[in-house]
Amino acid sequence: MATQRAHKAARLMISPSVILLLAWMIIPLGTTIYFSFLRYNILTPPASWTGFENYYYFLTDPAFIPALVNTLVLVLGVLAITTIGGILLALLLNMEFWGQGIVRILVISPFFVMPTVSALVWKNMFMNPVNGLFAHLFRAFGLQPVDFLSTLPLLSIVIMVAWAWLPFATLILLTALQSLDSEQMEAAEMDGAGWLSRFFYLTLPHLTRSITVVVLIQTIFLLAVFAEIYVTTAGGPGYASTNIPFLIYNLSLKQFDAGMGAAGGVIAVIIANIVAFFLMRAVGKNLEL
């Protein structure tokens, strides 16, 4: 009886926080859905009801398919680089060597740099076709410098974002590696198992859950990449580096079409939920191992 009273008291105490969190999520989403059914240009009010027209025009916009493809390429490209690179760096940092603590801090530090700052650093210090580091390296080898942001805009964005997220993957995977049973590794080594066999049959299965967590968390954030594109390429040339968030920004704040921007936001939420659904299924399968 006392336990039931304690449970009721606990529910009453946490209910204001739960209600506030629900309101925090539902009110903006409800407002976005409401505006998505309005023909509402910020410069020419008032708004009028338009039904599903905003969704139709957003899905048939010439920029939608390129933006969707760019979003998927960006997410998959960054995930591939950060997962493979994170495993290799975690294996390296898990070894004993002089200055290990300093190297770990240096490897992890890019994760704490704001996206806008990292984009400016890559744009002006590395990829500038005249004074950038890559331009000097190309000239040192007798090659013509490449204007990365004009000729390879999406690849440049992938590299910038991967540079920022690689430390996160490394940190998670390094933590998982440090919980690997060393006696099991020593027993496999005494039985004659080579480095590759130990990696594929012991280390990699041990990292499976951590890799799944890295992929899940990164995907949620990578679907919303915006600052790097805004600062460096502005979505161009053409639609070459436009993703779904940048397309919504263009419609909402450059063309002042709040209705179509809201429709794009709802579609982005649906896409993110579809991706999250499949990822959560993958997480569930891995957690059952």
Image (spheres, rainbow, N blue to C red):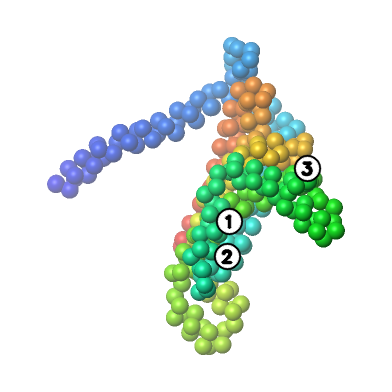
Specify the quadrant of the image occupied by residue 13: top left
Local secondary structure at mark 2: helix
If you read the primary sequence from the N terminus, does the residue marked by circle 3 or circle 2 appear first?
A: 2
Nearer to us in this view, 155 or 223: 155
The percent position of residue 56, horizontal first and vertical second, equals 68, 28
Q: CA distance from mark 1 to mark 3?
A: 24 Å
The percent position of residue 222, horizontal first and vertical second, equals 59, 46
- What amino acid is found at the position of numbered circle 3 in the picture? Ser
Q: Is residue 226 left or right of residue 69?
A: left
For image coordinates 24% across by 42% down, the residue present is: 10
If you read the primary sequence from the N terminus, does the residue marked by circle 1 or circle 2 appear first?
A: 2
For image coordinates 77% across by 36% down, the residue present is: 238
Q: CA distance from mark 3 to mark 2?
A: 31 Å
Q: Are marks 1 and 2 in contact (CB under 8 Å)?
A: yes
* Vertical order, 287 against 19 (above or below): below
Residue beneath disc 3: 150
Label 3 CA crowd tier, 10 Å (few <14, some 14–19, many 20+) = some
Nearer to us in this view, 14 or 52: 14
Residue 215 appears in the figure: no
Local secondary structure at mark 3: helix
Residue beneath disc 1: 166
